[in-house]
Image (spheres, grey):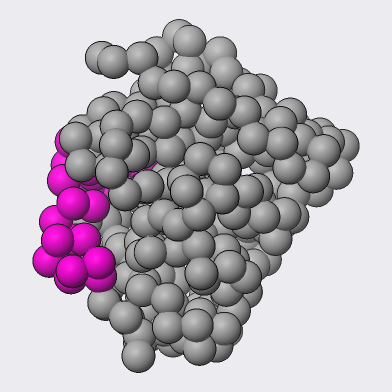
Amino acid sequence: MPVPTIEKVSNENAEIYCEYRGNGLSLLLIHGAMEDAGFYSSAAEVLADRFKVITYDRRCNSRSSGDHSTDMSVAQQARDAAAIIEKIGNGKAIVVGRSGGAVIGLELAAMRPELIDSIIVHEPPVIELLDEIEKQRWRSFVKEVYKKNLNEGPDAAQNKFMKSLVNVPFDPYPADLSERLSGNVEFFFKHELRGFFGYLPKTNSIINSKVNIVTAVGADSQDAYYVQATKALASELVCDNIVFPGHHDVCFWMPKEFANAIKSTLSRHGHIHSNE
């Protein structure tokens, strides 16, 4: 594999570790919880034949710095993504976010739509858009996981959390990736979990901005809460909901399929469908 170019972007008292590959229109991939840029490495290689693919470790994760003593702010994460697009992406990018990364993508679309060429949000856990019974159920789940981390530690919290993901392998990662990600687990449960799951998308702002957006769900994710939430989001945004192959962590376990789904979605929709 070609060695990616490494660059660090300074924003709001943090150094954000970034990698980029290929040439062409910029494509920013935003990772979810307990992950980093390495989760996208194989998919980025496939996408680099058509795009300048930018991946990064989010603030306070893996090789990026930040204040590990404070709770994550989705808005600040979106500002980090904006800074990366401005510095490495030549001021405009296609954005693909998964899970918590999709939540960040939604905030970016509301805050800085002029930086987005098109955006695909894959299975954002926006439980605040669910009906009242399901919303209360998953709010309770988040509280239980948060308390389990405080009382029993991150491993116990992770075991409980992973059981909520449908058809996602809980297999070991390669040693180098596993070593980096191990430091992200406790930070997620202590400082990111409630911020991601408490996020309410600014759907009116996204609609009014006329940013090109589609949502995506995994074919193997069945009726998981994040699938229900994504469909509710698509309904509010009046945008297309695409079925991707695989499950919630498709980018790591099925990178070629994930990359090809991105390519086909962008091609089929001609820079995807606008919610006009």
Q: Nearer the viewer, residue 81 or 43?
A: 81
- Give how far across and how far down residue 230 sits, in percent: 40, 70
- Give how far across and how far down residue 78 sits, in percent: 62, 56
Instruction: Name which residue lies at 63% across and 22% down.
Output: 63
Instruction: Name which residue lies at 70% across and 60% down.
Output: 75
The residue at the far top in this view is: 175
- Give how far across and how far down residue 7 sits, in percent: 56, 26
Q: Nearer the viewer, residue 72 or 114?
A: 114
The residue at the far right in this view is: 69
Instruction: Name which residue lies at 51% across and 40% down.
Output: 88
What is the quadrant of residue 3 in the picture? top left
Against 56, is 210 above or below? below
Using the rendered image of the protein, determine whether residue 2 is visible from the camera's viewpoint: yes
What is the quadrant of residue 23 in the picture? top left
148 relative to 109 in the view: left or right: right
Against 63, is 159 above or below? below
Q: Is residue 188 magenta?
A: no
The residue at the far front in this view is: 90
Using the rendered image of the protein, determine whether residue 128 is visible from the camera's viewpoint: no
Considering the image in quadrants, where does the C terminus appear? Answer: bottom left
Q: Main secondary structure of the magenta part?
A: helix
107 relative to 255 in the view: left or right: right
Instruction: Name which residue lies at 38% across and 64% down.
Output: 117
Q: Is residue 256 magenta?
A: yes
- Give how far across and how far down residue 11 sits, in percent: 73, 42
How many tags in the picture? 0
Considering the image in quadrants, where does the N terminus appear? Answer: top left
Magenta extent: 245-272
Against 94, is 204 above or below? below
71 relative to 269 in the view: left or right: right
